[in-house]
Image (tube, helix red, strand yellow):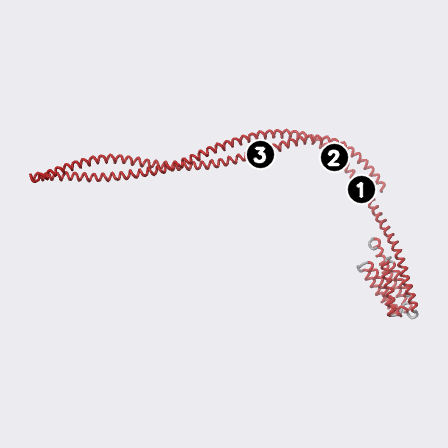
Amino acid sequence: MYGGKGTRDRNKKTLKFNIIAIWVSTIVLTLQTAVAQGINAGLEVLIVTGISSIIASIFYISKMNFRIKGLLVNLSPLFGCLYLAYLQGGLESGVLIYNACLLLVALYSDIILLCIYGFILDFSLILMYILSPKSILGTSMEFRGFISSLAIITLSIFLLCLLTKWSSELIRESLEKEEKTLDLLGKLENTMEGIDKSTEVLNGSIGKCNVNINMVKEISESVVSAVNEMTSGITMQADNVNNISQTIISTSNTVEQSKEISRKIVTVSEVVNNDVTEGTQQIKELDKQMSIIKKAVKSSLDTVVTLQNQMCDIDKFLAGIKNIAEQTNLLALNASIEASRAGEAGRGFSVVASEVGKLAEESNSTVENIYKIIKSTSKTTSVALGEAQKGNEAVNIGDQIARKLYGTFENLITTFEELNLHISKQSHVISDVKDTFAVVDTEVQNIAAVSQEYAATTEEILSVIHEQNNKISDIAQEIQEISNISNELNKIIK
């Protein structure tokens, strides 16, 4: 019951009316009491009812549930009247005031709120009667009068509940219909506004569409020209791609030949490398033999030098022997002279001296012969020493040359290994280039096929564009008819 916008507005209006009615009742009761009973009694009524009205106003402006707010707002004047009845010892118009409070609550058209309020009212009256009968009955009313008043109030509550139920149903139905009507009216207004805006937008769109169609027509004609140029360009591109494909095939053959040449170079390089390796081994063996020869020549040189030194020693020894022989011969001559001087006594000594002289001459002759032989041998030894020294120098030079040659062959091996490595890399690069050319050739062939398809497709597009131009003209006529209909619809709406 509190969900609809119309219901909420109605409840706010009812609360506002009740607050106004409470304040008006406060003023009326105050004036009535002041006129009938005096100013003091009027002030008493004003204080009690004024406080009740202020409390009701506080509840009115507070934020809480509507049903609780409505109950508290209307209970404030009720309790104010009960308290005033207690102060004055009863109210002559109490029943009317209580029924008036019920009527104010009934204005909410909320049967639950009315039942709660009625229960609180009956309970409060009974409680007041128990606590202070005079406040309810006054000085003239008896118990039967209280029962009849309570019955009237209860009957009023019952009747007001029935009326509230019926009225709330009617109000709810009317509010629902009103909300539906407002909703439909709003939708209709929105629809009419939408139609109006749509017709304006449609007219603007139609104008723009006409402009755009003319532009599309011009663009379509430009596209036709561009497609013609594109077709010729694609055909030329296909021819160029075929030429590129032939060039790639020729280049691929050249690369294959380069690969074959590289393979042969690798084979020749391997053979040469093997020969160089074998030559290196032979030079290594030669170096070993040169070392052996060097040792042998050095040994021979040392032997010849030793022999020459020994020959010098022998020459010295022979010179000593020759000197001894000459002295011996001289001594033999002196002995012979002395023996001849001695006569017969020295004849035997003379014979010995003669024999010694002969031996000395033979020794001298032998020394001469040995000296000649040694001199000849010394010359031969000197020549052999010179040749041995030359041979030793030659062997040293040959050993150095062999070592250099060995180093050169080692460098050749390293160079050939690097050469083989580079040739191998070059061979791999050539293989990669060949594979790349194969891929490129495949892609170029695909491009050629796609170019041919594009050429055929552009021809189809060209025919479609011609057909599109014809349809664009038809669309322009249809849009003009739509524009006329839109103008008529706009006139009808306005």
Comparing labels 1 and 3, the label whose residue is closer to the camera: 3
In the picture, the quarter occupied by the N terminus is bottom right
Is residue 179 something that shows in the picture?
A: yes
Under mark 1, the amino acid is Ser
In the picture, the quarter occupied by the C terminus is top right
Q: CA distance from mark 3 to mark 2?
A: 49 Å
Comparing labels 3 and 2, the label whose residue is closer to the camera: 3
Residue 431 shown left or right of residue 22 in the figure: left
Task: Determine which of the numbered discs, if any, sits on residue 216 in the image.
Answer: 2
Task: Determine which of the numbered discs, if any, sits on residue 435 in the image.
Answer: 3
Labels 1 and 3: the sequence-earlier one: 1
Farthest-out residue, left: 344
The quarter of the picture where residue 54 lies is: bottom right
Question: Where does residue 315 sit, x and y in percent of width and height?
Answer: 22, 38
Under mark 2, the amino acid is Val
Label 3 CA crowd tier, 10 Å (few <14, some 14–19, many 20+): few
**Pointer 1 residue:** 198
Labels 3 and 2: the sequence-earlier one: 2
Identity of the residue drawn at 21% across and 40% down: 317
Question: Where does residue 293 sit, x and y in percent of width and height?
Answer: 35, 37
Label 2 CA crowd tier, 10 Å (few <14, some 14–19, many 20+): some
Mark 2 residue element: helix
